[in-house]
Every structure is written in structure tokens, then in C-alpha cells.
Image (spheres, grey):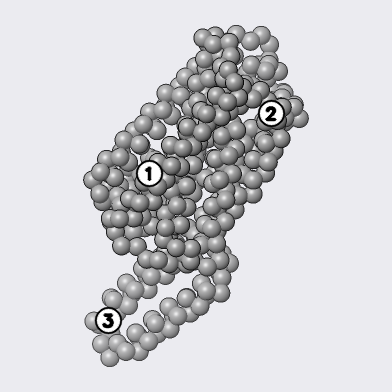
Amino acid sequence: MNYTKSDRDLQNLFGKIIESKREIYRTMPEETTPFLNEFETTSQPSIIHSDIARYTMITIYTVVFIGGTIGAIAMSFLLVKMNTLSVTTAAIVNLVVLHSLFLLTVPFRLYYYYINQKWIFGFAFCKAVSAMMHIHMYLTLLFYIITLIIRWLIFFQWKDKVEFYRKLHAVAASATVWIVAIVFVLPVFIARYGKSGEYGNTTCFTFQQELKNPNVKALNYVIIAVVTAITCVFLGLQVFIILKVVKKLPGSVWSHQEFWAQIKSLMFISVIIICFLPYHLFRIYYIQHIEEKQLATYNDICLSITAISCLDLLSFVISGNRFFKQKIIMLRDKLACC
């Protein structure tokens, strides 16, 4: 692993401290040896562990920022050709806006984790950036749910198409969601979060003490149960639909547009499973063992994984490309021959 200058200086200081302690306690080796051994075996791994976690989050946020920006730009060009009255199109437009707003906060996280390792933008802004992570996650989940339900309504022929009557209705519906999130949820989060514990002005994203509050703990359990239940139900229903489509379509299903439409729906659910579910499942254990400091690092890593959902727009653009579909069909044919 490549260490930064500050990391090497810290390790050199650590070595000097050990040597000085050995010199001081050399006259009493029997009493001091256990303490020195414990100091050596616990401090060094914690430093290395912290570096690994920090570089992991730096890598994730860098990939998210680059891939998410490319995906948002590419999807913006495609949206120009889509039906503006479609509810699905409105959900995708909101998803592009949501990802874009979140990506604006990512450079601050990269600056904190990689460049300075100190938060210099104020405690209030720290809470706002932290809140944006959670707002992004749950609004993304909401737009996924809306999109999937509309697709299923059309598939089961309960609706031929789901559209707004006017563009103004689409704007009003989108504005309602954003007003609730930004005008009501965000200020409450900033005002109330960070009140249960004492946090330093130079550190950020360390609000684990809030989980000691019984109300916050209960709210987390409710959210975990809801997200897990939605994921299981949606996955089961989508697998059922795909199997039904495969049985109905003649010949190779890979050449049918209807099959690819259901695969795209499965991609929405895959993002939920890969990005959102690990964070919520790990949180069950984390809430019960909040006193273990090392778990806070794992929680931060799981939370950073939720940001990978920003790559969904890029994956949708790539999966909708004819060249990509042709390559998938060619790969399937090669595997079938083998």
C-alpha cells in the first residue's frame, strides 16, 4: 500500500513513542512488557485499518463522481427524445436531478477523506452533506418504486399507458416531492441531528451517538424492515414476470424487446439489492453494538456503497445500446456452442 507523507510521519512518531517507552521502563521489564506488547499489537493495526477504510471510500466516491457525472450527462441527452408526459420519464428526470445534486456534495467528501482529513466547512454544512446522502438514497428508492409499479401496471395490462394530462401536472408532482424533501425533511434533519452527542468541528460524518436515542433507534428498525420487505417482494414479483415472459416468447428471448424491458426492470431491483440492502442489514448489527468503535468504519463504508446507485443512469444508457445487446447475444451463442 502507498502511504502519504502524513501517514509515514505518524508511523515514525509511533515508533519513537515505543522506543521512548522501552527506555523509560527498561528497569522494570516484567511489569511493563505486557503493556508495551499490547500497545504495539493494537495501535499499529488500527492505523492500517483506518487507512484501508479511508482509501476504500476514496476509491468508491471517485468512481461514483466520474461515472455518475457521465451517466447524468448521457441520460440528459436521451431524455430530450422521450415522452415528456410519461410518468416514467418524469421519474427518470427527477432521478437525474437527484443524482446531480448529490454529486455536487461528493467533492467535499473526497476533500475530507483524501486531501485534508479535517472538516473546514462548518458543522451545519457537515450535517447538510450527511443529510444529502440519506435523502439521495431514499428518494432514489422512491423513484425506483414508482418506475417499477408503472412498468408492472402496463405489463399486466391494467393500464395501456400511464401519463400526465399536461406538462404542468408532471412539474407539480415533481415539485411536491422536492418540496417535502428539501423544505421539510432537510431542515428537520439539520436541526435535530447531532444533538445527542458532542462532535468536534474538524470531524464530520460521525453521528453514531444519535443511535443511542430510543426514538432514533426505533425509526431505524422501521426503515430497515420496510426496505427489506420492499426488496424481497419486488424481487419475487420481477422474477415471476421474467419467467412468464420467457415461457410466452417463441424462439430466443434475447432478440425480443419485451424481454429486455423486463431485464431493465430487474436492473432497478439489482441496484437496490447491491447498493441499499447491505447498508440496512448491517445496520441491524451496528445498532445493537454501537459501542464498538470499529463498526463505525464499516458503517461508513456500507453507506458509501449506497452512492454507487449514481452509476445506474450510465448502466441504463449502456444496456439500451444496440451494440451492447448484440454483444450479449454473441456471448450467449458462444457459450451455448461450448
Dot placed on the residue nearer the N-terminal end, 2 or 3: 3
Q: Mark 2 = which residue?
A: 320
Residue type at tag 1: Phe
Q: Is residue 89 left or right of residue 6?
A: right
Q: How far apart in space, not on screen, are marks 1 and 3 (Cα)? A: 39 Å
Dot placed on the residue nearer the N-terminal end, 1 or 3: 3
Residue at point 64%, 40% (across, down): 72
Q: Is residue 291 left or right of residue 249?
A: left
Q: Is residue 262 visible?
A: no
Dividing the picture into quarters, in which one does residue 101 lie?
A: top right
Residue at point 27%, 47% (across, down): 288
Q: Is residue 236 visible?
A: yes
Position of residue 67 measured from the top left corner of the image (x, y, whole percent): 64, 45
Position of residue 175 measured from the top left corner of the image (x, y, whole percent): 51, 33
Mark 2–mark 3 CB contact (< 8 Å): no
Q: Residues within 10 Å of mark 2 (few under 14, many from 20)?
A: few
Q: Mark 3 = which residue?
A: 32
Q: Is residue 161 above or below residue 68?
A: above
Q: Nearer the viewer, mark 2 or mark 3?
A: 2
